[in-house]
Image: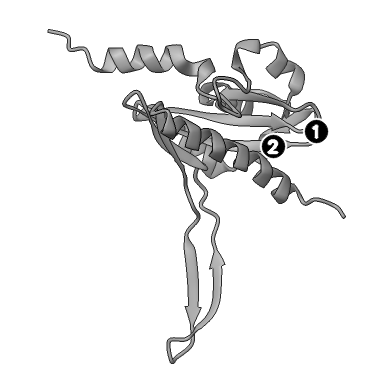
Amino acid sequence: MKISPRNRGQRFEQMVDLANHTYRLKRIAHVRKTFPESKIQRDKKGTIQKHWFERSGGLDYMGTVNGRFIAFDAKSTRKNYLSVDKVTDEQYTELRRVLDFGGMSFLLVHFELHSETYLLEAEDALRWRNSTERKSIPIEWFRERPSHRIYSRNGLILDYLDPIQEELAFKSTKSHTSED
């Protein structure tokens, strides 16, 4: 039986959900999965005839860490690269908006064939989308940035906040200081 790409992505999202649960229990972060909009079609009597979910178009997860807003999407691939088109235009727009409003946004990218997960900061994702002829980001590019590799540690299946702790701490401190 062939596993659909959607189900592969769901397995990775379950890992992210478990990490978020652990972060919450340890009082490190409060991050929740967002859900797509639900649509209902009713007949003239008001009976539900059809129910479906529309694509949210946004990012999969949102929350706070050290008083900072974060938003990210989880992407899984069975290739040796992440296709730039795997991220929708709406998701790129959301990555940019979060940055523009002072939050932090990124993608978590899981390479299934290698069991490797990386954090791709929004600025890099946007740069790949906008300024390169190449339509995919090779795993080698990620491997050249070992500080953004996600590991299982500290009781977390995916400690995805570790690569960005310094930036979160810096911006958190910076946003709480006043300049007189």
Residue 49 pos. (x, y %): 54, 82
- Write down the residue under mark 1: 79
Compared across the picture, whether 118 is left or right of 93 comes to right
Disc 2 residue type?
Ser
Labels 1 and 2 touching (C-beta < 8 A): no
Compared across the picture, whether 108 is left or right of 161 comes to right
Q: Nearer the viewer, residue 8 or 135?
A: 8
Question: Is any part of residue 70 visible from this angle?
Answer: no
The quadrant of the rendering that contains the C terminus is top left
On screen, residue 46 above or below 68: below
The quadrant of the rendering that contains the N terminus is bottom right
On screen, residue 173 above or below 68: above
Crowding near the residue tagged with mark 2, few <14, some 14–19, many ≥20 C-alpha atoms within 10 Å: many
> Which residue is located at x 54 percent, y 72 percent?
51
Q: Nearer the viewer, residue 125 or 70?
A: 70
Question: Is any part of residue 30 visible from this angle?
Answer: yes
Examine the image and state in which quarter residue 110 appears.
top right
**How many labels sit on residues?**
2
Residue 97 pos. (x, y %): 41, 34
- Residue at the far right: name it: 1
- Residue at the far top: name it: 180
Examine the image and state in which quarter residue 80 appears.
top right
Residue 62 pos. (x, y %): 43, 38
Compared across the picture, whether 175 is left or right of 47 comes to left
Q: What element carries label 2?
A: strand
Q: What element carries label 1?
A: loop
Q: Which mark is residue 76?
A: 2
Residue 148 pos. (x, y %): 60, 16
Disc 1 residue type?
Lys
